[in-house]
Amino acid sequence: MPDEEVGNIFKNVNRLAKAIVSSVKADGLNIGQSNGKIASQTIFHVHIHIIPRFKNDVESNKFPARKKFIIDELKKLGAHIQKILNTTTF
């Protein structure tokens, strides 16, 4: 991937991460990107993981279990994140 594209991706990751943290009131976040099977990549295209973190999910430096949501919850959360992206300058 050309350097300019990497820069553009992470510019958008930064904006999106801030909106997600604000939306879910996270205490912190992890951002991850893996390249290659040996690095645990299972979907072989460029994608970035933005993982909101909360004080109560810290356990031996492991990632928390994935939360299960119903589609209506995800739609509501997505709309809230989009509203923050549309109305906030980061």
Image: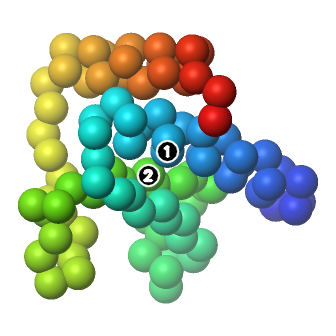
Q: Based on the displayed image, in which of its 4 quarters is residue 79 positioned?
A: top left
Q: For the residues marked 2 and 1, what is the alpha-carbon distance in whole angstroms? A: 6 Å
Q: Position of residue 76 (x, y in %)?
A: 27, 15
Q: Residue 65 carries which label?
A: none
Image quarter of the N terminus: bottom right
Instruction: Report whether 55 appears left or right of 4.
Output: left
Residue designated by label 1? 17
Are discs 2 and 1 less than 8 Å apart at CB?
yes
Identified by mark 2, the residue type is: Ile
Residue type for callout 1: Ala
Foreground: disc 2 or disc 1? 1
Looking at the image, residue 16 sits to the left or right of residue 73; the answer is: right
- The image shows residue 51 at horizontal and vertical percentages of 36, 54
What secondary structure is marked by label 1? helix
Labels 2 and 1: the sequence-earlier one:
1
Identify which residue, 55 or 57, lies in the foreground.
Answer: 55
Q: In the picture shown, does residue 73 fall above or below 31?
A: above
Label 1 neighbourhood size at 10 Å, few (<14), some (14-19), many (20+)? many
Q: Which residue is drawn at 49% across and 80% down?
A: 39
Tell me, for residue 50, which label it has, or none: 2
